[in-house]
Image: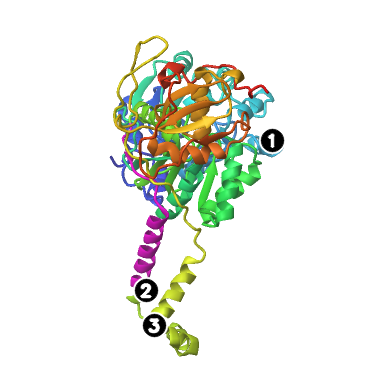
């Protein structure tokens, strides 16, 4: 749909920016049936929502004219959840309304409120801001609401998630009742529906995209790794894909700081975004990404909200998102404006089921692929070098380049190496600045069904789903806590899973003796368990665990200690159960 019915200044602005056709959300809000009505719009991140509501409010702002009246009390408010999104919205609306003489002012946390007050006193047509700062200016009478014709709530679901319900209600209560209210949200949970019912009049519900939250331009991938190899997986993914810009998501500020430091140390040009940074630091980090001085951004969910980086081609979930909406919002940083993007989940093997449920709830299909190995990264490097060399070889070399080449070949040491030696030396020069890939453990084999067991305490049948081949015995380990140390299967099983980075299905029989406990680990997981258990830190790290036999390269049948009571792992109760931890043996 072309922008035929828009005012001339808006059409000029869109043409200058290369807009020829309206996106689905823009077409929906410009339909004749929406004229003058309150709207509740759900649309995917990156679908052109900012321009959509910028165009939707044009009739109220321009009133049929081609120029806006002189700037005074604002005609429209746009409320956004984060500083970055608010500043991005200001940028978009500024170019959209510039030909019509529009003046857009931002009021956001982290900026100087006195400067914002002076900008408001100088007059504005549109004010964009975060909930807390906008409420503050309203209460201090810096922001005059009496002329408002339109209010927009952008990313309304995120504002409620961040706890801004009270601020939003205070803003909506303060502005004139005779206004047009537009709500834009990726999802419409119960809280958004209640807010719309209370503050909108006969709102028209628009769901753009047929309810399918998966962005058509995003390829979802997932890879299973050992928990201690998450960072190595991030390194190899960045190296293999080599995107112009990548974003890596972590769950906490501490995790962002740690990963940012480690990636920088490895040679990646990296910036961090988290709540502990000042606004100046955040602005500088984003500018470094846009200017190409940095290529990797490590961020928390809130800090990355609303960021638009056109060249962003890869999103890595170094830590799993907390819910489907967060997964979609993270992934929506890429695959925007018709560009293709990749959303890569790194899944600890003991959280695969959680990841599968998350993807199912988000209604996205992910391709499960192994994490790239160091050899795969080196092979891709060789391909890239070959491609670049072929392109350069097709060009006519300059006289200066030819002179350097002749000088190299004429050098006695180079002459001995020959053309191949010279080429190999140049390849090493090209590879030198690249961060070294990491060695990743081979993917563990698929598990087959294990037979049913009987609990020896009750003789009841216990269903054991998804473990090892019944023809293969496990590998036996011992730990120096037994019955005298209050060893109990209810805390033993979760403890072993955490300590050895294994799943419940990979722990077999548990035999508790007076001064030690012996337990069985699936053959394919034994080596991994042994490595992880030796690196223990934190609570109960003093408990010693060691194998009772040589660790096999391939599963083989060990003979477990006889005449001891066996506890099937499923009888140990749920992993979430909180029980008294282990106590060192007496004496």
Residue at 66% of width from left, 41% of height from top?
Answer: 278
Taking 73 as reference, is 179 left or right?
A: left
Q: Is residue 77 visible?
A: no
Q: Secondary structure at mark 1?
A: helix
Residue 391 magenta-drawn?
Answer: yes
List x then y, in percent, for residue 382: 38, 65
From mark 2 to mark 1, how far is it between C-alphas? 54 Å
List x then y, in percent, for residue 363: 33, 29
- Nearest the viewer among 561 and 155 is 561
State if disc 1 and disc 2 touch (CB < 8 Å). Answer: no
Frontmost of labels 3 and 1 is 3
First-in-chain label (3 vs 2) = 2
Taking 302 as reference, is 111 left or right?
A: right
Circle number at residue 392? 2
List x then y, in percent, for residue 383: 35, 63
Q: Residues within 10 Å of mark 1 (few under 14, many from 20)?
A: some
Frontmost of labels 2 and 1 is 2
Asked where in the image residue 378 lies, by quadrant, the reply is bottom left
First-in-chain label (2 vs 1) = 1
From mark 3 to mark 2, how far is it between C-alphas? 17 Å
Q: Residues within 10 Å of mark 2 (few under 14, many from 20)?
A: few
**Magenta-colored span:** 364-392
Residue at 60% of width from left, 43% of height from top?
Answer: 258
State if disc 1 and disc 3 touch (CB < 8 Å). Answer: no
Residue assigned mark 3: 419
Residue assigned mark 1: 113
Residue at 60% of width from left, 37% of height from top?
Answer: 253
């Amino acid at each position: 749909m072309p922008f035929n019915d828009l005012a001339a200044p808006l059409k000029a602005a869109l043409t200058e920016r290369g807009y020829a056709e309206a996106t689905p959300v823009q077409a929906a809000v410009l339909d004749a049936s929406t004229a003058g009505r309150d709207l509740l719009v759900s649309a995917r991140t990156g679908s052109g929502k900012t321009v959509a509501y910028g165009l939707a409010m044009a009739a109220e702002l321009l009133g049929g004219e081609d120029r806006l009246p002189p700037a005074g009390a604002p005609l429209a408010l746009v409320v956004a959840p984060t500083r970055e999104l608010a500043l991005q919205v200001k940028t978009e609306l500024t170019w959209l309304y510039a030909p019509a003489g529009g003046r857009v002012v931002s009021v956001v946390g982290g900026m100087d409120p006195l400067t914002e007050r002076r900008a408001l006193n100088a007059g504005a047509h549109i004010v964009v801001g975060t909930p807390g700062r906008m409420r503050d200016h309203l209460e201090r009478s810096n922001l005059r609401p009496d002329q408002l014709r339109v209010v927009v709530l952008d990313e309304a679901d995120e504002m409620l998630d961040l706890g801004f319900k009270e601020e939003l209600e205070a803003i909506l209560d303060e502005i004139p009742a005779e206004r047009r209210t537009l709500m834009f949200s990726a999802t419409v949970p119960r809280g958004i529906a209640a807010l719309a019912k209370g503050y909108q009049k006969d709102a028209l519900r628009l769901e753009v995209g047929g309810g399918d939250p998966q962005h058509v331009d995003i390829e979802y991938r997932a890879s299973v790794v050992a928990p201690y190899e998450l960072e190595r997986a991030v390194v190899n993914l960045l190296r293999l894909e080599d995107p112009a810009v990548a974003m890596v998501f972590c769950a906490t500020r501490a995790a962002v700081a740690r990963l940012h430091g480690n990636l920088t140390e490895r040679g990646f040009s990296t910036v961090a975004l988290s709540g502990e940074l000042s606004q100046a630091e955040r602005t500088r980090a984003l500018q470094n990404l846009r200017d190409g001085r940095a290529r990797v951004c490590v961020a928390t969910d809130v800090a990355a909200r609303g960021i638009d980086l056109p060249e962003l081609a890869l999103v890595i979930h170094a830590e799993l998102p907390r819910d489907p909406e967060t997964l979609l919002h993270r992934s929506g940083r890429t695959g925007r404006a018709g560009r293709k993007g990749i959303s890569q989940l790194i899944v600890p093997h003991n959280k695969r089921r959680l990841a599968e449920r998350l993807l199912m709830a988000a209604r996205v299909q992910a391709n499960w692929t192994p994490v790239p190995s160091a050899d795969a990264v080196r092979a891709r490097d060789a391909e890239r070098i070959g491609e670049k060399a072929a392109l350069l070889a097709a060009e006519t070399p300059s006289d200066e380049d030819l002179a350097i080449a002749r000088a190299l070949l004429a050098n006695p040491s180079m002459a001995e190496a020959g053309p191949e030696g010279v080429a190999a030396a140049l390849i090493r020069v090209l590879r030198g600045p690249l961060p070294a890939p990491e060695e990743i453990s081979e993917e563990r084999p698929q598990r087959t069904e294990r037979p049913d067991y009987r609990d020896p305490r009750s003789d009841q049948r216990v269903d054991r789903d998804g473990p090892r081949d019944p023809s293969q015995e496990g590998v036996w380990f011992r730990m120096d806590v037994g019955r005298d140390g209050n060893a109990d299967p209810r805390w033993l099983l979760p403890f072993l899973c955490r300590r050895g980075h294994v799943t419940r299905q990979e722990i077999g029989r548990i035999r508790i003796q007076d001064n030690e406990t012996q337990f069985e680990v699936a053959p394919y997981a034994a080596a991994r368990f042994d490595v992880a258990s030796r690196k223990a830190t934190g609570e109960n790290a003093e408990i010693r665990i060691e194998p009772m036999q040589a660790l096999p390269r391939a599963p083989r049948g060990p003979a477990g200690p006889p005449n001891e009571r066996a506890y099937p792992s499923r009888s140990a109760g749920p992993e979430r159960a909180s029980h008294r931890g282990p106590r060192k043996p007496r004496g």
